Amino acid sequence: IVMTQSPDSLAVSLGERATIKCKSSQSVLYSSNNKNYLAWYQKKPGQPPNLLIYWASTRESGVPDRFSGSGSGTDFTLTIRSLRAEDVAIYYCQQYYDAPITFGQGTRLEIK
Amino acid sequence: EVQLVESGGGLVRPGGSLKLSCEAFGFTFSNSRMDWVRHAPGKGPMWVARFRTEGDVGDRIAYADSVKGRFTISRDNARNTLYLHMTSLRAEDTAIYYCTRSEASGISLSWGQGTLVTVSS
């Protein structure tokens, strides 16, 4: 499954909303449990990726509630409400519906 | 606290071999699915290999097509350590290699700091 993110880079003013899209080449919605096998990770320089969101919309423990995930099937969105300086990072989506697990190419988020 | 500590990376010539290790702390290693994921500069992360636990559904060991036949994943539950033995290394294997503790579904819950593998002559 090919994961395609848009845009490749994004500049947003502090306090504004950032929206990142992720599209999968086939549905990652498992009909038997109605779950979307889609996760979002944040990667800062010199650090490993950090899990933000899984099952498309479930926030990992400790992740601020300004981060939210939405979407179903093949189209997903990561929204960062009220951007803070520490949110500067590269964001990756990941599907774990089918082997091999695959990631998007990443979206670089910067401050405008 | 969950901690994963990778080691064993370095500079190796094309065709060479390396063995990476990942020591785990803070969780029950023997009950956990473990994966290797690599990340090359300017690209998205790439899943490399997994080692499921006995209770999980499906093949215990699996590899990405690009490393199949060259890389071997193994684990020593007594030592809480995951390994990745890499042979016939190519320039395109150059990346930071991370071990991850994963849910049975495949969600990468925790990542180590990574170890850099550079394949160059």
Image (cartoon, rainbow, N blue to C red):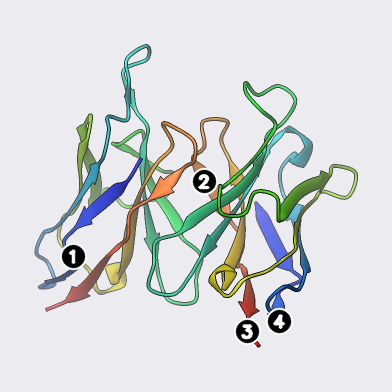
Where residue B14 appears, as percent x and y from the top left, is 68, 77
Q: Chain of mark 3?
A: B
Label 3 in the same subunit as label 4: yes
* Callout 2 secondary element: strand
Query: Which sits in the foreground, B5 or A30?
Result: A30
Residue matched to label 1: A83
Where residue A4 appears, as percent x and y from the top left, is 25, 51
Query: Distance from label 3 to label 4 (Cα)?
Result: 5 Å
Tell me the crowding category of disc 2: few under 14, some 14 to 19, or many 20 or more residues within 10 angstroms, Cα based.
Answer: many
- Is A96 placed above or below B38 here? above
Residue matched to label 4: B13
Where residue B25 appears, as percent x and y from the top left, is 74, 53
Give the mark nearer the N terminus: 4 vs 2: 4
Where residue B84 appears, as percent x and y from the top left, is 74, 56
Residue matched to label 2: B108
Give the mark nearer the N terminus: 2 vs 3: 2
* Labels 4, 2: front one: 4
Residue matched to label 3: B120
Asked whether the residues under the numbered discs 3 and 4 touch, taking CB atoms below 8 Å apart as contact, a structural biologist would say yes
Q: Chain of mark 2?
A: B
Query: Distance from label 2 to label 3 (Cα)?
Result: 29 Å
